[in-house]
Image (tube, helix red, strand yellow):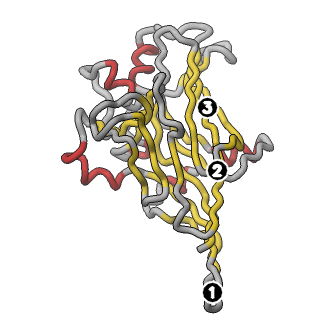
């Protein structure tokens, strides 16, 4: 996956393409759609408050839509994604640190733009939606993403406030026509299943396709995604950071 996420082009790694052979025939294509978020850098002065931006929905190439529960741009945020452009600093408030990535870089692979996620009692129905209305048919399979703990979680770790029995787990659920077709999960803080504390301290590849292949897991085609964050409670807050979300699309047009 590491080579894939370095590709800047939106439609990359074309696997198969058949062109129309005659009038009325359809063409099909399979390609990987990756979201690096760098395209938003030019909009930063217009939209960003405290290096963060949110709105009810913002899109990637009019196919992938990332959602938050909020009333309007930079007002009324209630839960979900915030778009961020910085690495955390000691001067940041805890609320800012919820959405700021841990580690030496802001985004994955030294990118400047990524998503912070906070789960709250008020959340959108789906965190990511795909709009395939421009195609005659479309199906999708997950490739993977880059994932990281928040700066806030690392503050707890550095202060020695994560103890035996604590955990923070991200669950990603895939839906098609509102039906659950599969799920995967990943521990970002794990002091439950291991004898010693395991914690993600910087961006990691979550190679979902490889994980499914190794564990013989099948997830059907999906058109929406829901994140759920489970924690052991206490001072741990259900938040994490996301970058380079990648899916493989097979379309007919």
**Front: mark 1 or 2:** 1
Front in this rendered view, residue 16 or 220: 220
Label 2: few (<14), some (14–19) or many (≥20) C-alpha neighbours in 10 Å = many
Residue at image coords 46%, 15%: 157
Q: Which mark is residue 180?
A: none
Residue 115 in the image: state x and y as whole percent.
Answer: 41, 39
Name the residue rendered at 35%, 44% in the picture. 113
Q: CA distance from mark 2 to mark 3?
A: 16 Å
Task: State if disc 3 and disc 1 touch (CB < 8 Å).
Answer: no
Residue plotted at (24% across, 20% down): 91
On the image, numbered disc 2 is attached to which residue? Answer: 222
Tag 2 secondary structure: loop
Left or right of residue 7: residue 226: right
| Labels 1 and 2: the sequence-earlier one | 1
Q: Quadrant of residue 167?
A: top right
The residue that mark 3 highlights is 171
| Residue at position x 65%, y 73% in the image | 16
User: From the viewer's perspective, is residue 174 above or below residue 98?
Assistant: below
Q: Secondary structure at mark 1?
A: loop
At which x and y percent is residue 103?
A: 41, 31
Callout 3: SS: strand
Mark 2 or mark 3: name the one nearer the start of the chain.
3
Residue 177 horizontal/vertical position (percent)? 65, 49
Per the image, the residue denoted by label 1 is 24
Q: For the C terminus, which image quadrant?
A: bottom right
Q: Nearer the viewer, mark 1 or mark 3?
A: 1
């Amino acid at each position: 996956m590491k080579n894939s996420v370095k590709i800047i082009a939106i439609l990359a790694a074309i696997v198969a393409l058949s062109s129309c052979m005659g009038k009325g025939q359809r063409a099909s294509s399979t390609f990987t759609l990756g979201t690096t978020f760098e395209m938003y850098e030019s909009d930063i002065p217009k939209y960003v408050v405290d290096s963060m931006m949110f709105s009810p929905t913002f899109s990637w190439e009019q196919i992938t839509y990332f959602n938050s529960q909020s009333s309007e741009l930079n007002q009324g945020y209630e839960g979900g994604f915030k778009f961020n452009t910085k690495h955390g600093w000691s001067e940041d408030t805890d609320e800012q640190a919820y959405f700021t990535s841990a580690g030496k870089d802001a985004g994955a692979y030294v990118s400047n733009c990524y998503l912070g996620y906070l789960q709250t009692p008020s959340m959108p129905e789906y965190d990511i939606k795909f709009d395939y209305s421009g195609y005659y048919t479309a199906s999708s399979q997950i490739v993977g993403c880059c994932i990281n703990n928040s700066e806030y979680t690392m503050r707890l770790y550095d202060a020695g406030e994560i103890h035996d029995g604590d955990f923070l787990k991200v669950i990603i659920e895939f839906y098609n026509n509102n039906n659950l077709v599969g799920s995967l999960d990943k521990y970002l803080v794990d002091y439950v299943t291991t004898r010693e504390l395991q914690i993600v301290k910087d961006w990691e590849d979550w190679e979902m396709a490889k994980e499914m292949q190794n564990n013989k897991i099948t997830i059907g085609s999906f058109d929406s995604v829901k994140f759920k964050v489970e924690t052991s409670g206490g001072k741990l807050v259900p938040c994490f950071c996301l970058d380079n979300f990648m899916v493989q699309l097979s379309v007919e047009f």
